[in-house]
Image (tube, rainbow, N blue to C red):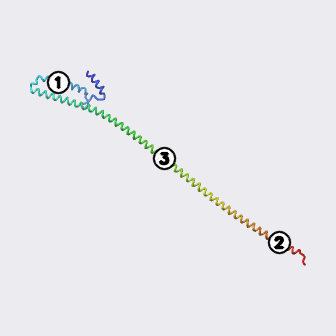
Amino acid sequence: MRVVDDAHEMQRHSKKSTASNRLGGSDLRVLRDNMSEMNSRVSNSRNKRDSIESSTSGATYASNKRARARKRIEQLQKEMDEVEARQSSAGGDMMQVLVFMREEADRRAETEDRRRREDGEARLAAERQERDERESIRRDEAAAAAAIRLQEMELNRALREEQNKKEAAVAAENRLRYEERLERSRAEARERHEQLMLLISALQRGSQPQQ
């Protein structure tokens, strides 16, 4: 019956140990049986000593022995209670370890999420800065190209104006030379006409009869 009861007790308290480190690793079930045996012996000893308690010295010895036995039993019971308390505390410590491990895992996950978020933000900031730099370079190149085109247009206009001025000067000089040649031709024509008129007049005077 004791074996069956022990088996049922172990099933109900499967997480508790049957050995005690403070008691040298001894099986607590053996200690329990020894305590039961000791209590039985103390009871039997009490019954045997009842018949001779008329002697003062014998009664004192039996009383002291029973007191020591009770003290020992109380000490063993206290140690058993301490063992059970440590086992319960060990279960609580295990629960604390599990809670700590869960909190540590949550903390690491939160740290990893924060690191990934910071890395993502840094990557986006770098990409945005690179995009802004490319846009700034593009604007600078476009402005430089526009300035070059404007300078080329100004230079072409200045060249055209200079060419126009040169052409106008050549045309004016040509016109002046033409007018000078025309004026000389007119003067020569007037001079030839006058000479011709003088010659005709002289001929007319020479052909008239003298009186």
Residue at the spot 13% in from the left edge and 28% down from the top edge: 63
Q: Residue furthest top?
A: 1
Residue drawn 30% across and 26% down?
Answer: 12
Disc 3 secondary structure class: helix
Residue visible at 23% across and 26% down?
A: 32
Residue bearing mark 1: 43
Q: Callout 2, which amino acid?
A: Met
Inter-mark Cα distance, 3 to 2: 101 Å
Q: Helix, strand or loop at disc 2?
A: helix
Q: Is residue 120 above or below residue 84?
A: below
Q: Quadrant of residue 122?
A: top left
62 versus 104 height, above or below: above
For the residue marked with disc 3, what is the amino acid? Arg
The N terminus sits in image quarter: top left
Give how far across and how far down residue 46 sits, in percent.
15, 24
Residue that numbered label 2 is attached to: 197
Circle 2 or circle 1, nearest the eye: 2
Q: Position of residue 131 (x, y in %)?
A: 50, 47
Residue occupied by mark 3: 128
